[in-house]
Amino acid sequence: MRHEQPASVPLSARLGALLVALIATAGCAGTAPSPTAQDYQGLFEALALRGASVSNIVSGDPGCDDPGLAANSVRIRLRDPDDGAQRDAHLFVFKDRAFFEQAGPAVDACQEAFEVERGMADGQAQRLDVSPFRIFGTEWSPALREAVGEALIGSAGIGS
């Protein structure tokens, strides 16, 4: 009984097959999906890592009487990294850029009502807007403002 050896596949054929497989795989990869923003918990963790830990979370409190903003808002207390003081803030999270843009005027009016109710001059509350987040509060030190800004940017999926 005689056994035949299988024919050897030429190196060029093997390389060609490998090249076809690589091209097919690359074609499936497409473009990378855009980053997804973190939820409240992810943002709170990012704040804590920057010395601005979060406490006293109250859902549905936009800081004004606009019931349309309640579903997107929480009132939080932030620890100021500079002096350890607790600072109230109103945080809004919107499901996408369109809702973020659409809600801008409502959040503007809410912040103005918040300032009027507390006897503040217009624009006295500090505010940061990084889609999909908007947040405002009072008496933020430069360190707190920096911590909040960095946490928003990182949690929005547009930075570290």
Image (cartoon, helix red, strand yellow):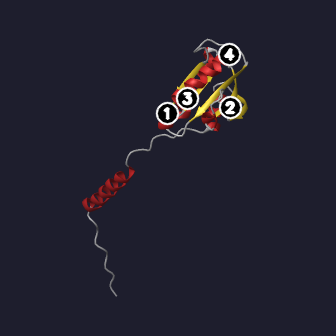
Residue at 52%, 28% (x, y): give it: 104
Q: Which is closer to the viewer, label 1 or label 4?
A: 1
Residue under the point 34% across and 52% down: 27
Point out the residue furthest to the bottom here: 1
Q: CA distance from mark 1 to mark 4?
A: 34 Å
Give how far apart the Cα atoms at labels 1 and 2 are.
Answer: 19 Å
Q: Is residue 11 above or below residue 50?
A: below
Residue located 31% across and 53% down the image: 23
* Cα distance between the residues tagged 2 and 3: 14 Å
| Res. 12 image quadrant | bottom left
Residue found 45% across the figure and 41% down from its top? 34
Q: Which residue is mark 3?
A: 106
| Residue topped by disc 4 | 82
Vertical order, 32 against 146 (above or below) = below
Which label number is shown at residue 102? 1
Task: Calculate the distance from the C-alpha at mark 1 to the C-alpha at mark 3.
Answer: 8 Å
